[in-house]
Amino acid sequence: MPLHSYDDAVAYLLGRINYERNPSLAERQAFRLDRMRRLLAALGDPQERIPAVHIAGTKGKGSVAMMTAAALTAAGLRTGLYTSPHLVRFEERMRVDGETPSPAEFVDLTSRVAAAVAELERDDESLAATYFEAATAMAWEFFARRGVEIAVLEVGLGGRLDATNVCRPKVVAITNISRDHTALLGETPAEIAFEKAGIIKPGVPCVSGVANPDAAAVVRRVCVERNAPLFEIAERFDVIEGRTGEAAVRAVTIDAAGTTWGPIAVPLAGRHQAENAAVALHLLKTLADRGYRVGPQDAGAGWANLNWPARVEVVARNPTIVIDAAHNVASVEALVRTLDDDFQAARRILLFAASREKDIPGMLGAFAPAFDSVVLTAFHNNPRAMPPDRLLTLWQAVADRPADRFERSEEAFDFCRRIAGPDDLICVAGSFFLAAEIRPIVMA
């Protein structure tokens, strides 16, 4: 089915069943890998021809994917990268050597996948692809057209039944695990780890950054069951910390099977990003051991100018404005530690919005002691937003001081700017969707 414009293509995708916008529609039985396999077969099975690096985890998986892909590109390998969600434009999800599809390519990719989906649906309505499945298929088609030599894939949700889990990985990674998406993945770290560990394939090496003991035990057990070599990064990396002016700087060194890589400057702010960098380096070292021409110098070169939007991203100064996509308790705690370690400010102002299904009391409780002023709002690019009046009720349950609230995020941000002095810090956090609304306002 031909689509004639960029807007037509976006409208088609938004018309698919979309668990990113409506997670209440999702049930475990709704996720089926056979549907994804049938769709990719209709596209010529590009995932069978392009080897992959597959990355799951609760937090850090996107950063690990970005760092891994940047190093592989610097090594001269034509590298595909697939991440989610996007911040502003849908095609941000798929890149080859850092380049997204052009608008014309995006329309053509969507048309190609839409035609395959329509054909499958005519045979069996249960094969109707979801939004994320269509996006994943588009990424594979894009990678095939661009002659990608290796693809770096971030899992969308969980791992075992995620649409990305039809790839043929050379190595997989599981970053740190904490509670998120509990309705689908389970309530305990062990249950969640089981879903994440579903990406581990027989005989394929696994790099683990999992710190929770129960979750780590699950990853070990699955690796044993599948005869997959396991590399746990704990005790296998060192971090050197220093300062350049007011900014903290870090470099990481890994020890992999007696071989040292590093020290290599960590491209993103926060101690947690040093751990993510260690996972990425272990992935690259594993690929090097399997014949890929990549070394520590490529990580250094690829990371030198790496920019990962909405990950402790400084988008303005005087006052300092930081945008971060932290949307669960663990990522909020990491953000607060980073603000403590890496930023100096006379006052801190938090602009917060969140999705209804998240642990909002937990996030607000973690933010409360770290901020002088709190402004609550809602994003309007997704129906999942918790209304600001309800956020205020939740805030009052965890803090004994007032907060301001605004119905629209742009009004809330304007208020933050008005009350901030040049030495203050405004932090925008709580959701990818809030980051997506506020970032273009600041950048403009």
Image (spheres, helix red, strand yellow):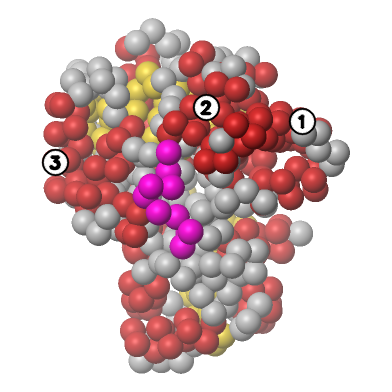
**Residue 343 picture quarter:** bottom left
Q: Which residue is mark 1?
A: 108
Q: Which mark is residue 406?
A: none
Other-residue count near label 1 (Cα within 10 Å), few / some / many at <14 / 14–19 / ≥20: many
| The C terminus: image quadrant | bottom right
Q: Which residues are magenta?
A: 23-32
Q: Residue 265: image x %, image y %?
A: 42, 36
Q: Earlier in the sequence, mark 3 or mark 1?
A: 1
Callout 3 amino acid: Ala
- Main secondary structure found in the magenta portion: helix
> In the displayed structure, would residue 78 be above or below residue 128?
above
Q: Is residue 201 left or right of 434 when viewed as pictured?
A: left
Judged from this view, the residue extending furthest toward the top is 291
The answer to which of 411 and 140 lies nearer the viewer is 140
Q: Residue at x 25, y 59 (%)?
A: 187
The answer to which of 39 and 394 lies nearer the viewer is 39
Q: Which residue is mark 3?
A: 217
Q: Tell me if residue 367 can be seen.
A: no
Q: Residue 110: image x %, image y %?
A: 71, 35
